[in-house]
Amino acid sequence: MKLPKKRDNDYSAEAIRERVKFLSKLSGHKPEYLTSSAIDPDLTRGNIENIIGFAQLPVGVIGPLLIHGEHAKGNFFVPMATSEGALVSSYNRGAHAISLSGGVNVVVTADSIQRAPYFVLEDVHKAKAFSQWIVENFSQLKAIAEGTTRHGKLIKHHSFIQGRMVIVRFYFSSGDAMGMNMITKASHEICKYISTHYPIIDYAIESNMAVDKKPAHINSILGRGKSLTAEVLLKEKIISRLLHTNAKAINAAYHRQVAGGLIAGALGSNGHLANGIAALFMACGQDLANVSESCVGQIHTEVSGKDLYVSLRLPSLVVGTVGGGTSLPTQRECLEILGCYGEGKVHKFAEIVTGTLLAGELSLAAAVVAGDFVTAHEKLGRNRPDSKPN
Amino acid sequence: MKLPKKRDNDYSAEAIRERVKFLSKLSGHKPEYLTSSAIDPDLTRGNIENIIGFAQLPVGVIGPLLIHGEHAKGNFFVPMATSEGALVSSYNRGAHAISLSGGVNVVVTADSIQRAPYFVLEDVHKAKAFSQWIVENFSQLKAIAEGTTRHGKLIKHHSFIQGRMVIVRFYFSSGDAMGMNMITKASHEICKYISTHYPIIDYAIESNMAVDKKPAHINSILGRGKSLTAEVLLKEKIISRLLHTNAKAINAAYHRQVAGGLIAGALGSNGHLANGIAALFMACGQDLANVSESCVGQIHTEVSGKDLYVSLRLPSLVVGTVGGGTSLPTQRECLEILGCYGEGKVHKFAEIVTGTLLAGELSLAAAVVAGDFVTAHEKLGRNRPDSKPN
Amino acid sequence: MKLPKKRDNDYSAEAIRERVKFLSKLSGHKPEYLTSSAIDPDLTRGNIENIIGFAQLPVGVIGPLLIHGEHAKGNFFVPMATSEGALVSSYNRGAHAISLSGGVNVVVTADSIQRAPYFVLEDVHKAKAFSQWIVENFSQLKAIAEGTTRHGKLIKHHSFIQGRMVIVRFYFSSGDAMGMNMITKASHEICKYISTHYPIIDYAIESNMAVDKKPAHINSILGRGKSLTAEVLLKEKIISRLLHTNAKAINAAYHRQVAGGLIAGALGSNGHLANGIAALFMACGQDLANVSESCVGQIHTEVSGKDLYVSLRLPSLVVGTVGGGTSLPTQRECLEILGCYGEGKVHKFAEIVTGTLLAGELSLAAAVVAGDFVTAHEKLGRNRPDSKPN
Amino acid sequence: MKLPKKRDNDYSAEAIRERVKFLSKLSGHKPEYLTSSAIDPDLTRGNIENIIGFAQLPVGVIGPLLIHGEHAKGNFFVPMATSEGALVSSYNRGAHAISLSGGVNVVVTADSIQRAPYFVLEDVHKAKAFSQWIVENFSQLKAIAEGTTRHGKLIKHHSFIQGRMVIVRFYFSSGDAMGMNMITKASHEICKYISTHYPIIDYAIESNMAVDKKPAHINSILGRGKSLTAEVLLKEKIISRLLHTNAKAINAAYHRQVAGGLIAGALGSNGHLANGIAALFMACGQDLANVSESCVGQIHTEVSGKDLYVSLRLPSLVVGTVGGGTSLPTQRECLEILGCYGEGKVHKFAEIVTGTLLAGELSLAAAVVAGDFVTAHEKLGRNRPDSKPN
């Protein structure tokens, strides 16, 4: 039993038809919607193999969200793709609360993307010497890395030594691309150079210290992709009118939830950053697997008179506005809605994402405190009677 | 500046048109593909608000993947949605390596979904007494919870006491649904009952110990959603022929990567579970935000003669085959390809997901060791010259 | 070059003399104080081998500390051994602040100690069946375990399955002993029974899931040794008079430090529990290596009017009042000062430890806020001019 | 009820007598051994307050341990203070196995100690600007810090921004002292300077990102105190003769325990580093509270032919050879046995500690595999019939 013998990277209508026919016969179900897209499959070359069609997820929009960033300035309407009823409405409510309170301040505090090869030396003494050699030859490694890419720059490195193994975590800037392909190629050349210029016993291009697509403390501490922080001072009246509660109550609940998350051994502390991350990533052509590290972040609240100060630290937002899935048709359109498609836009996009996440956090926190949480889902999370269990 | 005054939950063509028109005017870009879907927007009622169209991501297929589960038995062809070139090919290679080695064994080891309200008592002595009261009144709480749902069952609970605050983590089974809406409603009723039958000072429906949509050790230790484990004994010849390396080399690299991940403070230890999780979740109508906890898992390898034994523990796979996004048109079709749409299918689906993830892990690990990693991405991760930075 | 050929477990004056003579010759330094103790070395039989003398650490006392526990009730004076100047004074200040505010409430919320053997089966299907067999044969395993000990009881277990390996975490109660020796022996018999009554391929008595003497989330979540929680409502006047600050300032600083600790990836959240733990463990005959897991705990603060509510959750306090080092002469005396030597005392002792820790936390937090932190160390952390670098 | 009104820092015989008399009366027990020490209490000035005597713990010795460090070279006999029977014998066995295999290689890979104040600015934009100001004014801050100390040097810093709060983690070298007092004073001056030269709204000297005396990922990743790595190639014959097992068996067990520890959410991966750390810290005048972060480390094993390669990464060993408890009488003597008392010795001491820890790891791992674990404790962990529960 094999898939029809078309090559994996055949994007022709015929190849798709044969694959789908084969699957239909096997399963007894003929997919119609998967193959109904108006998109030319050839546009997905470089993004998929063995293509059989397009998965489709509805996109809603929230806004206006007033942002005071260094790159994103003004009111934004943000597209979010999800299947969770009430999510878009909840983020929308948060966006209004922020905008009416004067907007969200946000800045990018760091920007780099990592690969972390390991190298095995003869013993610990030689491992230590090698780690020193890396320091001394950094500019040479930088030249090699940057010879492979127009946009990538090797910025710095950290070495970690476990016995005779040296793990070198390389930090690159990758322009407006997410950058993993770019820096993997660059790291590959670095490894080749080292392995031919230094008495290495063994090496591999990745030690799991990148850490790509896994939640890990190193990313939360040292950053990965874009690191940002945002804040809003929610006004008493807005909290009362829109969120049906008050600063003190949200603050108390939040600090209790911090305690809960700490007991649970959660990374960071937040309500549901992953919801906003996933919805924005899906709409805007980001790699959905990067939800894993991008969703780690931390909310901090303080009562300020009768207002509520809320900040978000988002240390490892892995995004791009060129490359990857950004030029797929609907993804590009969503980026364009934000004015974020293409070069020179990635920091603006990162700021919008971060502001949106803060909106979602506020709305959820308020719903939990005010007891609206269940009723909102009851009201908006209902569709055809056959499709929802209860 | 406001979105057109249609109600959020208006799914009519006119409402969509007005929203899109408004966004086009603002951004200067008119989306075409977003609004080109053949899907009736009304079918998304309960999944989205303020709808403006459909995000579309290409779906590829891998297989056959030979699975020996308790629910999934035989050869499977698995749809995966992604924009990362080479991903589908890589998982496909892993699937072939597994199938030719005799298949992947997989079992579900636990199944439950959680909500964790907190309750504030007068002091620690009363908090302790309350935690005892919960134990003694569990059957009453169970009856209340189960009165709100046909499918949900309250199975057990854990209490955690921080001073006068008692956090109660309730464990439910939710049938074939992912279940968060279902158990939130049930927990809401539990909270209402408790707050009227016990001298509670304050409470909220969630303490962040659920832990929903956040990576956290409690999920990895105690499970969340479906917990599974899988294994394969990769044959020497297959490793050599398909993966271009050998058991000892993969094993050595893997254990070094475990060391790397431990230094980095990663949860679990794996190569890229998040890739497979995200691709399957997007194709098959799962909540993409649950990538955050579902992607935590652990690979363990042992050399067995010249073969390689590889196991995967996947403790917190949050999935469903009814409800949520599963009945959206393309998502339903992908579930049907797997024979996993609807009731009685969730364990089968979970086993297929887990087997697929193991395939992806093997292929990546081998590529890193054999040095194919960069070349595969170079070959398959290329599309139109304008769309990929380098 | 070898130590004099006395047997390791020779506690005679002559054996000690020969060992010390050998070391003196080698190092050129003759220890005088190490060998000056009034304690009969034979009393250390079972606690040390190759004995050369006694390490001596000064003990200070704090109090009165007013405790409202279930076992410790009334005012206590607590001995603490340390070399950190200002530590005893700081804990003493905290004790006074607590006592003047009405005392600390404290309860034991759980009590168990763990061993976690692993068992390797043939495949995952057999691993799952084995985990079920453990459930079904638990009472038999309990009988075997309890046949090895007068005090130990096997209470429950958790199974964790990674591929064909099943890790079984056994929970025991160990009476007033810390209990690791007791339950290791019991677990050894369990393993022997299982390996002769079930087709096990391999096993070992410990999988590192106990987790003994290592900081780990499982201990923090599920408890190890004694789990306690404590609280105090610090009165405005006391905060002002003794701690030179106010409730709001401590609360704000504390929540910012929670944020700091979260970014840093700390387990739990506290100022310096380890200081109190180590000082009490050294004075009172506890195993100093258990500082590693016992020091993990969590402070939570809330402003209550102008007072400050502070709670401490201490999930994994590993202590005993019989066995181990508790019957060594000075250690026994310190336990007697607390009225905690011997059987029936371990929960009382655990409550006193927890209350003392809370005192230390308050004092440090206040010192950081009020800026007394440096001056206190300057004043009390000074000794002979030659012995302190600056 | 109050302690006799002697001042806390009164070290006279009379003050001690009165305190002890008071405690005796209260408890009904008269301590004899606590007050029996030959040490002049005045020597503890700066280390303790409210002194009532000396806690005494037996010290055993292991060796020879053959070390190939950069600072420790040759055979060492290492004093360890503990109350755990069999511990000294077990470390001794490991030392012999290492020495007979050719010795342990060890290097110091990093050396720094941290304080991490937080500063609150007006908003995130000003927080970002402040973090830049710190970079630009680093040499000024360095001069201020170094004006407070002869030995401390400010090396570098990391900034972390959460909303309007900037946490600055300062890295110092502290010569041969552990250094916390020294750098606290230096950081205090830095804070004072900043608060008078920059529009800071609030600050505190510590944000919990130091992270002092708490287990935390940042310490494990970036180091704290001394970072070291060590290795040994255990010879087949030695493993067989001394450890009663073989390379493959230890390696297999170890990797299964890594899996166990990962599931448990342990920091690092090791058997019982805390045992060796605590025993050496107590003997040699280190701060016992620093067991909490020093005990985190990671063992990695690889089979090499029939030998076993074992490495240890110890990232956060907080030690000193001057200051703190190092000049207390018995502590100084133990350091002298190692040739490690005083200036210029701290790296040598750190290397000996690390080598000793590796010895303990090997012996325990072998005991678990060979099944000697229980019997060794049975044989050596027994003393007077009344003092050990079973």
Image (cartoon, coloured by chain):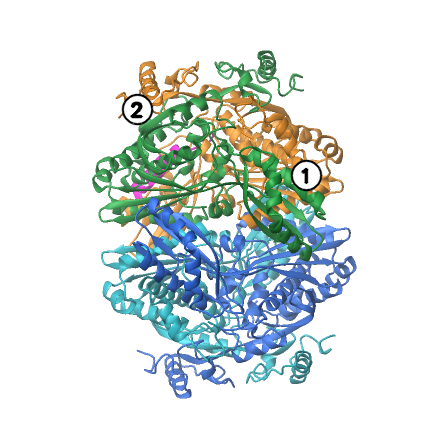
Chain colours: A cyan, B blue, C green, D orange
Q: Quadrant of the N terminus of chain B?
A: bottom left
Q: Chain of mark 2?
A: D
**Residue C194 visible in the displayed image:** yes
Mark seen at residue C213: none
- Circles 1 and 2, Cβ within 8 Å, touching? The answer is no
Residue that carries the numbered disc 2 in the rendered image:
D8
Q: Position of residue A273 (x, y in %)?
A: 43, 63
Magenta residues span: D175-194
> Above or below — where is C71 with respect to B202?
above
B132 above or below C172? below
* Residue D369's disc number: 1
Report the amino acid beneath label 2: Asp
Residue found at x 44% / y 17%: D33
Q: Residues within 10 Å of mark 2 (few under 14, many from 20)?
A: many
On screen, residue A332 versus residue D356, left or right, reads: left
Residue pushed farthest bottom?
B14
Pointer 1 chain: D
Q: Main secondary structure of the magenta part?
A: helix
Disc 1 packing (10 Å; few <14; some 14–19; many ≥20): many
Residue A346, can we see it? no
Question: How far is disc 1 from disc 2 in space, using C-alphas?
Answer: 51 Å
Residue D237 position, x and y percent, is 76, 33
